């Protein structure tokens, strides 16, 4: 599975023209791509800062938002050479640059350091909140998804945008409010260009390992103390002298006869 499929990268090429009489025209060409084999190409033409026409490479059709604009759009749509022109522009602008950008990303990636923990919150709807954090990753684009028993969770999820660490790396935090249910598995799934496949992090509701170690050490010390006490009691019992009182004739007094 290629994690890059889940990312979305964007290239923008534009041309702006100003005339002496104040007329303003702008032509934007955009490349949206998830990978080098899946590229969506769009164009927008602006006139005096108002959208005049837009082109969708998936449908190969120009459109406008008024009847007069659609008349102009039909002129391009009926031109047999326009479709080939748009396709050639897509190949030149998008495909070549996409390959170059992906090679750059491939050679400059840092895997995220993921932590999953429980935090306190004041919500009355749910009794628990989990936070899944990814630290020190590059490039910026990342996807965090919550799963409950393998199914995507679409509600009670809050995520913040990627934050820069100031050193070309990023961090992100995603929160899940939920009510614990016996036997369910809560998973934080992280997808990033640096990972060959999605990382799955299951929430362990048991006691944190550090606290568990403290309890184990305490119990071990208590058991060891009990062993020493038992050994001491056994030792004292073996080495102590047991005195059994014996009645003598003097203790029995004069005989009756």
Image (cartoon, rainbow, N blue to C red):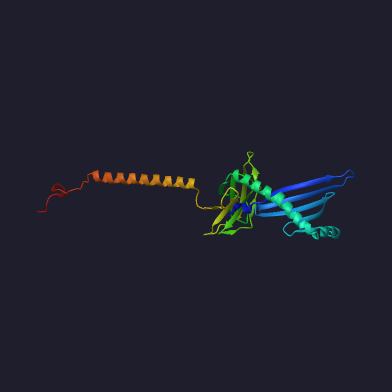
Q: Position of residue 140 (x, y in %)?
A: 64, 46
| Left or right of 27 on screen, residue 134 | left
In this rendering, the answer to whether 162 lies above or below 60 is: above
* Quarter of the rendering occupied by the C terminus: bottom left
- Residue at the location (62% across, 46% down)? 103
The answer to whether any part of residue 230 appears in the image is yes
Q: Among all residues in the image, which is located at the extreme right?
A: 21
Q: Among all residues in the image, which is located at the extreme top?
A: 167
The answer to whether any part of residue 136 appears in the image is no
- Residue at the location (71% across, 50% down)? 92
In this rendering, the count of numbered labels is 0
Location of residue 62 by image quarter: bottom right
| Left or right of 66 on screen, residue 114 | left
Q: Position of residue 114 (x, y in %)?
A: 56, 47
- Of 139 and 162, nearer the camera is 139
Q: Position of residue 71 (x, y in %)?
A: 85, 60
- Residue at the location (81% across, 46% down)? 16
Q: Position of residue 123 (x, y in %)?
A: 63, 53
- Of 60 and 185, nearer the camera is 60
């Amino acid at each position: 599975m290629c994690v890059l499929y889940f990312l979305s990268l964007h290239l923008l090429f534009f041309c702006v023209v100003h005339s002496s009489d104040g007329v303003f025209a702008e032509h934007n060409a955009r490349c949206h791509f998830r990978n080098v084999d899946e590229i969506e190409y769009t164009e927008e033409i602006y006139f005096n800062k108002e959208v005049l026409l837009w082109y969708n490479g998936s449908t190969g059709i120009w459109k406008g938002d008024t009847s007069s604009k659609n008349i102009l759009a039909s002129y391009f749509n009926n031109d047999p050479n326009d479709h080939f022109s748009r396709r050639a522009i897509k190949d030149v602008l998008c495909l070549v640059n996409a390959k170059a950008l992906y090679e750059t990303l491939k050679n400059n990636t840092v895997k995220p350091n993921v932590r999953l923990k429980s935090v306190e919150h004041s919500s009355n709807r749910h009794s628990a909140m989990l936070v899944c954090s990814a630290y020190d990753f590059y490039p910026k684009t990342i996807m965090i998804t919550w799963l409950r028993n393998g199914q995507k969770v679409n509600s009670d999820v809050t995520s913040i945008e990627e934050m820069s660490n100031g050193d070309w790396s990023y961090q992100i935090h995603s929160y899940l409010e939920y009510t614990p249910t016996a036997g369910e598995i809560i998973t934080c799934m992280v997808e990033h260009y640096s990972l060959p496949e999605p990382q799955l992090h299951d929430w362990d509701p048991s006691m944190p390992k550090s606290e568990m170690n403290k309890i184990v050490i305490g119990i071990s010390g208590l058991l060891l103390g009990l062993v020493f006490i038992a050994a001491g009691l056994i030792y004292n019992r073996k080495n102590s002298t047991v005195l059994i009182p014996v009645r003598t004739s003097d203790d029995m007094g004069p005989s009756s006869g």
